[in-house]
Amino acid sequence: MRRPILLLALLLLVAGCTSAPDRADTPDKPERPPGQLWQPRPGTPWQWQLSGRLDPTVDVPVYDIDGFDHDADTVADLHRRGRKVICYLSTGAWEEFRPDAGKFPEAVLGRGNGWKGERWLDIRRTDVLEPLMAARVDMCRDKGFDAVEPDNMDGYRNRTGFPLTAADQLRYNRLIARLAHERGLAVGLKNDLDQIPELVGDFDFAVNEQCAQYDECDTLSPFIEAGKAVFHVEYEVPTRGFCPEARRLGLSSMLKRYELGAWRRAC
């Protein structure tokens, strides 16, 4: 008399194991597990080129290039050469020369940030900016980039035309980090030195300009201590003036010109 009951139980068990999974457990675009995100190590050499014809022959493992100016074929070529490729984007300032510039309403555009055709963004308006920045990070992902370098991430320390606070900046920077991580991309914290203690856990590396010139390089140590690269450039200090300290701290340092062409002089 027990056999029919056992057979029925077995059939129900098999049916439960082979049924389709709940849609709530299988999102259309699953996040890549954090352990699979690229995380460059301290001291990793790099090249940063945002202007001029790209020179793909610099023998370094990391390239940082403009996300709008380069296509998927360029990224694939750098991958074939053994490079990881970072997608440069401006996430804290509007640029009139970008193809999506017309999608930014006037209400979120503030003062100029010192570069021609650029204005600070009202980062409090995440209702407007999140979908625009998500589309930009989608572009980086779709072109095959490994990471994102979001620029102008310290508006709260500048005269933007908006009453931005440190809390506003933390919230926005974490939003940008989340957008990258959700798409399987690593992300770097650009400058924003004062908030490194709060943000080092949210970002996979740092990008810094002129910490030696302003005697600020020690503030980047939390990234190094966390095993994360600090990609660092100077423009006005000769290599002899910053390379010894950069090597001591474990920074990935080089001298560049302000236009960020192909020329470089690494430590």
Image: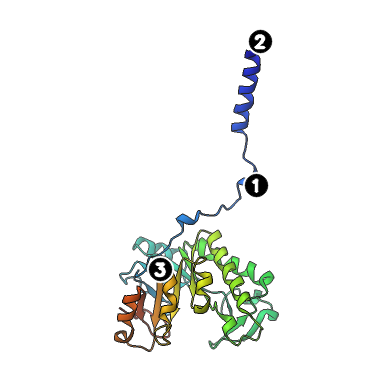
The residues tagged by marks 3 and 2 sit, at their Cα atoms, a distance apart of 68 Å
For the question of whether residue 96 can be seen, the reply is no
Compare residues 193 and 105 and report the one nearer the observer.
193
Q: Name the front one of labels 1 and 2.
A: 2
Question: In the rendered structure, which disc, 3 or 2, sits on the residue that comes first in sequence?
Answer: 2
When asked about the image quadrant of residue 160, the answer is: bottom right
For the question of whether residue 146 can be seen, the reply is yes
Q: Name the front one of labels 3 and 1.
A: 3
Q: Amino acid at mark 1?
A: Ala
Q: Compared with residue 202, is residue 231 higher up or lower down, i.e. above or below?
A: below
Compare residues 91 and 171 and report the one nearer the observer.
171
The 10 Å Cα crowd at callout 3, few under 14, some 14 to 19, many 20 or more, is few
- The C terminus: image quadrant: bottom left
Compare residues 72 and 196 and report the one nearer the observer.
196
Assign a secondary structure to mark 2: loop
User: Are circles 3 and 2 on residues that touch, CB within 8 Å?
Assistant: no
Residue 91 image point, x, y percent: 56, 74
* Disc number placed over residue 202 in the picture, else none: none
User: Are circles 1 and 2 on residues that touch, CB within 8 Å?
Assistant: no
Residue that appears at 62% across and 18% down:
6
Q: Which residue is mark 2?
A: 1
| Count of marks, rendered view | 3
Compare residues 221 and 178 and report the one nearer the observer.
221
Q: Which residue is mark 1?
A: 24
Q: Which residue is mark 3?
A: 225
The residues tagged by marks 1 and 2 sit, at their Cα atoms, a distance apart of 41 Å
Q: Compared with residue 61, is residue 167 higher up or lower down, i.e. above or below?
A: below
Residue that appears at 65% across and 47% down:
24
Residue that appears at 59% across and 67% down:
175
Q: Amino acid at mark 2?
A: Met
